Amino acid sequence: MHELSLLEGMVQGLEEEARRQGFVRIHQVRLEVGRLSGAEPEALRFAFGPATEGTLAEGAELVLLEAPGTGLCRACGAEVEIGARFDPCPACGEGFVDVTGGTELRIKDIDVE
Ligand SMILES: [Zn+2]
């Protein structure tokens, strides 16, 4: 489950930052997760507990801000929403869709004490 190692890396970065700024606890973590990021929201929720255990973020609430996958069709030029990276264009049914959004997986912000 790669979501766990992803989160562990993020939490480690958060902790370092929090300590540097003198925070004692992280209450809430808001994470942007794009449909095409390769991370599953369910798996992220499941892994968040174990990933934050024993850290400043232990017991924090995880808020997932899910972003749709978007792309630009090379064949018809339409801006479309896609569910997976190599999906065909839903407007014309063919062509190659260049991904323009939905690949992000990053911490948007956090609530600290
Ligand atoms: Zn198209």
Image (cartoon, grey):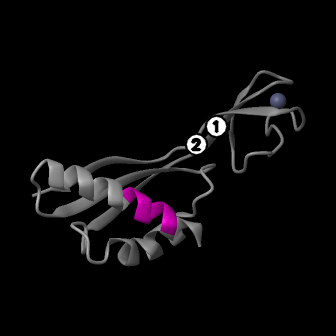
**Position of residue 45 measured from the top left corner of the image (x, y, whole percent):** 44, 70
Q: Is residue 41 above or below residue 1?
A: above
The answer to whether residue 46 is left or right of residue 37 is: left
- The residue at which mark 2 appears reads as 102
**Position of residue 94 measured from the top left corner of the image (x, y, whole percent):** 90, 36
At label 2, which amino acid type do we have? Gly
Q: Main secondary structure of the magenta part?
A: helix
Q: Are marks 2 and 1 in contact (CB under 8 Å)?
A: yes
Local packing at callout 1 (Cα closer than 10 Å; few below 14, some 14-19, many 20+) is many
At label 1, which amino acid type do we have? Thr
Q: Earlier in the sequence, mark 2 or mark 1?
A: 1
Say which quadrant the C terminus sits in. Answer: bottom left
Q: Secondary structure at mark 1?
A: strand
Say which quadrant the N terminus sits in. Answer: bottom right
Q: Distance of mark 2 from mark 1, alpha carbons?
A: 6 Å
**Position of residue 25 measured from the top left corner of the image (x, y, whole percent):** 15, 64
The picture quadrant for ligand 1 comes to top right
> Front-most of 5 and 28?
5
Q: Residue 26 — which label?
A: none
Q: Which residues are magenta?
A: 5-10
- The residue at which mark 1 appears reads as 70
Residue drawn at (42%, 65%) of the image: 8
The answer to whether residue 97 is left or right of residue 79 is: right
Residue drawn at (13%, 47%) of the image: 21
The answer to whether residue 69 is left or right of residue 105 is: right
Quadrant position of residue 93: top right
